[in-house]
Amino acid sequence: MIPFSVLDLSPIVEGGDARRGLDETLALAQAADRLGYERFWLAEHHNMPGIASAATAIVIGHVAAGTERIRVGSGGVMLPNHAPLVVAEQFGTLETLFPGRIDLGLGRAPGTDGATARALRRYFEGADQFPRDVVELIQWFEPASENQPVRAVPGAGLRVPIWLLGSSLFSAQLAGQLGLPYAFASHFAPELLLEALALYRREFVASDRLAKPHAMAAINVFAADTDAEGVRLSTSMQQSFARLSTGKPGKLPPPVDDITTILTPQQIAGAKGRLLYSAIGGPETVKRQLTDFIALSGVDELMVTGMMFDNTARIRSLEIVAEAREQF
C-alpha cells in the first residue's frame, strides 16, 4: 500500500486560542506517529484568525520534539516570503536537531491576502523569482566548497528533502524539470489535479535527488463511526470555506446537524466544489472513497487533511483511515 501522510493547519476553534490549537496539533501528530503515518506537514498562512501555523518552522520543531518516528515538514513554506538562505538555515537547524525526519515543502503563493503580502515585504518581488530561488535553496543544502564566501550554518551538506507544492500547473512543470517530488493541493483546489499530475510525470527529469516521479495529492477526510457523523463533522470546514469566500475568515466554527440552516444554497455549492475530493462518512464509506481517489489519481503517496472542531474526532478520523489503509 502507498504511504499515507497528514496535513494540518493548527486550527484555532471558536472559543479557543492559538495555544490550544498548537497543543491539539501536537496531540494529532502523536496519534499519526503511533498509527504509522509517513509524514506530518504544517502550512504557512498569515493573517488568518483560525490558523496557528504562521511561524511554520517553529511549529515543526515543536511537533518533531514531541514525536518519535514520523517525518515532520512544511506543506508548505511560501518561499517568496523568505530569503532562501534563511529557509536553509531554519530547516538545516531542524534537520540537525531531528536528523532524517525533516521535509521542506515549498509553495509559490503568499499564503495570505494582498495587504498582508505587502506587510511581509518580500512576496511581490519573490514570486517572479520562484524558480531561481528554489534552485538557490537547493544549493544551500549542498556541501560547501572550500572558498565559498557564504554558507548555510547549519544547512550546508544536509540535503534536506525538498518538495514542490502547487494548486496549478506551474509548480508541477517546475518540479518535473528539477527532478523533485511534487504534492498537489487537491483538498482545496481540485480543478487541475489530474492535468497537473500528468504534466509533472511528463516533464520529469531524473536528478541526483530523485530517480523517478513521486507525486502526492491531498484529500479531505472526515471519518467517523457512522456516515451521518462524518457528514456532520464536515460542516465546520464548509462554514470555513463560505466565510473565506466572503473575505472574512474566522476561527473554525462547531459542526451543525443541518448545514442548510447556516449557509445559502450558493455557499453550500461553493464549499462542495472546494471539497470535491473528499472522503466523508463511516469506515466503509471512507475506505471506498479513498480507494477511488487513489485509483483516479495514481499517486505514490496520499495526504489526508480535515479541519474539525473537536480534536478527539480528528484523532478518531486518523484511526479509521489507518484501519482502512491496512485493509487495502
Image (tube, rainbow, N blue to C red):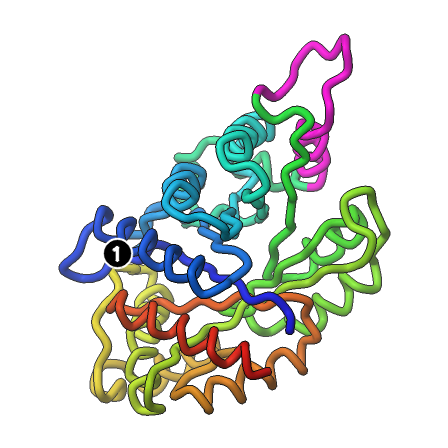
Whether 310 is drawn above or below 209: the answer is below
Residue placed under numbered mark 1 in the picture: 12
Between 238 and 280, the one lying in front of the other is: 280
In the rendered image, residue 303, in percent from the top left (x then y), is placed at: 54, 65
| 9 inside magenta stretch | no
- From the top left corner, tell me how far across and down residue 160 is, in percent: 63, 38
Q: For mark 1, does the 10 Å Cα neighbourhood hold few (<14), some (14 to 19), or many (20 or more) residues?
A: many
Q: Is residue 122 visible?
A: no
Identify the image quadrant of the C terminus: bottom right
Q: Residue at x 55, y 59 (%)?
A: 38
User: Which residue is most to the left?
Assistant: 15
Vertical order, 106 against 1 (above or below)? above
On screen, residue 24 versus residue 99, left or right, reads left
The residue under label 1 is which amino acid type?
Answer: Ile
| Residue 146 included in the magenta stretch of the image | yes
Vertical order, 20 against 314 (above or below): above
Q: What is the magenta range?
A: 131-153
Q: Which quadrant of the view contains residue 280?
A: bottom left
Percent from the top left, x then y, of residue 76? 52, 49
Residue at coordinates 58% horizontally, 68% vertically from top-left?
A: 302
User: In the image, is 162 to the left or to the right of 189?
Assistant: right
* Quadrant placement of the N terminus: bottom right
